[in-house]
Image (cartoon, grey):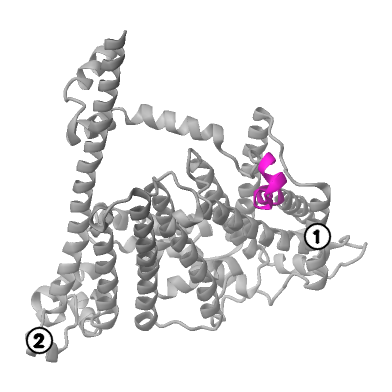
């Protein structure tokens, strides 16, 4: 019965044309995805266990083995620290202090050395994980059926960073307390969804962001329950991944570490040397009553903290989740088979831009340099500029490779979308304030909320926009209006329309090109089959 029904669905539309290809693609999506996943599952690796031979001639493929070895040192030292650590706010800092005071055999044998290896080992884990992600990115290591390997590498990097974040609080010092408070309370901003977002009102009404924050914190604020939960998370994140990896290695018969004993010894001595020469920081005990300025996290989250300072809190929360998603989107959009560095200019500039942002943002937040209206447009423009440079380099390569004219390979939709985005962000920050940032509207907002107790902030702003046109989404200067220039609201509507129209038109054009290519493949296959039949 199911087979007949499936055959009926298959015969509803022909396989030719855009509609036919899309229809049959959606219909066969579950089967195609399963095949896609299984092909990549066989090629997947976590710590370069499938690149043992490559590692013998290329040191970049030994990163996975070094990564795994450092991870084992972190787990082993962590187990030893568990014996003496007390996961309670009244004793956590003191228990770490006791470890740090012991360099010889005594009450806590070489506690400072073990803690140093654990701390610097965790840092080395994140550095090596980052190097692997960058290696795969710049060498096109995610192509030819290795997409899942890149996804897993990125996921392990994120897990390593959040494992470090959960471990950071366990010190229970001032810096860790406030850094964790910033990160753990950010989900609460997700309850401020604009009403026009599908499901936004439902999320706000059910307080899903606030609930997530309370689950993380174990209550409404950081306290003993938070330390207990973070202690469990810190332990769990490492051991779940380790169990998964060990089961896979045991089942497939892979070699765990493609590095020599000397490499292991050198890595161990480097971590031990760092622990002795630069003892792991202790800081001062946590004090919820005193807010440090600036609030800083451990080094690998500094850039993200600066990014959060350049955004509205709600948008910053969305972007925090969105950055890894955008990286994966870029990965799946890069469908060409080339893996050479010179043949992938756009991907190269995305990677270079990300590295520049990480370094510069980290420096800026350490020095407490951030201006919402001055800095943000510069970074939006620079990222757009990186992408444009990469596009024009790639454009030249494709023309040379295929021997075609410029108009045959020019992607007007990509360039147009970038230019619209760059100009929109500049207008947004330099020429007007939107809603919550509108200075004039902010003064009127309390009056509206007092007069209408049932209003949300979004509803109050909507009310102001309708009753006081001068407080529209954009604060347009009177001199600008007198010259007959467009109002800020009109400019904003224009950009939103272009943001929607350009990708929509580009998608339609792309689908027609895709359908034509697939029709050509079907024609070629039919002609080949006909020739073979005639020959027989």
Crowding at dot 2, Cα within 10 Å, few <14 / some 14-19 / many 20+, comes out as: few
| Residue 256 in sight from this viewpoint | yes
What residue lies at 24% left-to-right and 78% top-to-bottom?
427
What residue lies at 75% left-to-right and 46% top-to-bottom?
259
What residue lies at 68% left-to-right and 60% top-to-bottom?
124
Mark 2 lies on a secondary structure that is: helix
As displayed, is residue 491 above or below residue 237?
below
Q: Name the residue under label 2.
A: 481
Residue 387, quarter of the rendered image: bottom left
Residue 60 among magenta residues: yes
Crowding at dot 1, Cα within 10 Å, few <14 / some 14-19 / many 20+, comes out as: many
User: Which region shows up in magenta?
Assistant: 52-66
Mark 1 lies on a secondary structure that is: helix
- Check the picture and name the quadrant holding the N terminus: top left
Q: Position of residue 414 (x, y in %)?
A: 28, 59
Q: Looking at this view, is 95 or 99 the one in front?
A: 99
| Residue 452 in sight from this viewpoint | no
As displayed, is residue 45 above or below residue 96?
above
Residue 114's tag is 1
């Amino acid at each position: 019965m199911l087979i007949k029904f499936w055959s009926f669905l298959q015969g509803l539309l022909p396989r030719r044309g855009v509609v036919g290809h899309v229809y049959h693609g959606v219909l066969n999506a579950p089967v195609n995805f399963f095949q896609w996943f299984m092909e990549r599952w066989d090629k997947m690796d976590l710590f370069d266990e499938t690149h043992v031979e490559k590692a013998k001639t290329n040191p970049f493929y030994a990163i996975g083995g070094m990564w795994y070895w450092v991870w084992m040192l972190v787990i082993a030292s962590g187990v030893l620290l568990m014996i003496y650590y007390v996961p309670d706010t009244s004793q956590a800092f003191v228990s770490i202090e006791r470890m740090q005071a012991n360099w010889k055999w005594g009450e806590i044998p070489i506690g400072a050395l073990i803690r140093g290896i654990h701390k610097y080992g965790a840092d080395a884990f994140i550095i090596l994980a980052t190097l692997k992600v960058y290696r795969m990115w710049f060498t096109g290591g995610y192509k030819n059926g290795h997409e899942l390997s890149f996804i897993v590498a990125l996921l392990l990097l994120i897990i390593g960073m959040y494992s470090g974040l959960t471990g950071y609080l366990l010190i229970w010092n001032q810096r860790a307390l406030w850094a964790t408070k910033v990160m753990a309370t950010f989900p609460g901003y997700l309850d401020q969804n604009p009403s026009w977002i599908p499901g936004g009102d439902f999320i706000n009404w059910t307080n899903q962001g606030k609930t997530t924050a309370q689950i993380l914190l174990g209550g409404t604020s950081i306290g003993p329950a938070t330390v207990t939960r973070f202690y469990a998370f810190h332990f769990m994140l490492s051991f779940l991944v380790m169990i998964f990896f060990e089961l896979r290695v045991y089942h497939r018969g892979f070699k765990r570490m493609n590095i020599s004993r000397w490499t292991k010894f050198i890595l161990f001595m480097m971590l031990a040397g760092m622990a002795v020469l630069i003892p792991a920081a202790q800081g001062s005990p946590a004090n919820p009553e005193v807010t440090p300025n600036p609030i800083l996290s451990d080094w690998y989250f500094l850039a993200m903290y600066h990014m959060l300072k350049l955004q509205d809190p709600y948008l910053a929360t969305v972007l925090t989740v969105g950055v890894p998603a955008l990286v994966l989107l870029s990965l799946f959009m890069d469908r060409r088979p080339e893996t050479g560095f010179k043949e992938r200019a756009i991907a190269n500039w995305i990677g270079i831009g990300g590295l520049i942002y990480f370094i510069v943002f980290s420096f800026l937040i350490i020095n407490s340099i951030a201006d919402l209206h001055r800095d943000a447009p510069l970074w939006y423009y620079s990222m757009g500029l990186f992408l444009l440079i990469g596009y024009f380099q790639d454009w030249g390569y494709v023309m040379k490779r295929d021997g075609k004219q410029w108009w045959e390979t020019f992607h007007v939709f990509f360039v147009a979308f970038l230019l619209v985005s760059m100009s929109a962000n500049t207008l947004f920050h330099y020429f007007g304030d939107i809603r919550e940032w509108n200075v004039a509207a902010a003064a009127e907002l309390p009056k509206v909320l007092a007069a209408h107790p049932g209003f949300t902030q979004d509803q109050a702003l909507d009310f102001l926009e309708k009753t006081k046109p001068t407080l529209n989404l954009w604060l347009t200067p009177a001199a600008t209006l007198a010259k007959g220039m467009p109002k800020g609201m009109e400019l904003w509507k224009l950009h939103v329309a272009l943001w929607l129209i350009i990708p929509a038109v580009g998608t339609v054009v792309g689908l027609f090109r895709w359908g034509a290519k697939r029709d050509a493949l079907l024609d070629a296959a039919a002609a080949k089959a006909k020739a073979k039949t005639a020959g027989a």
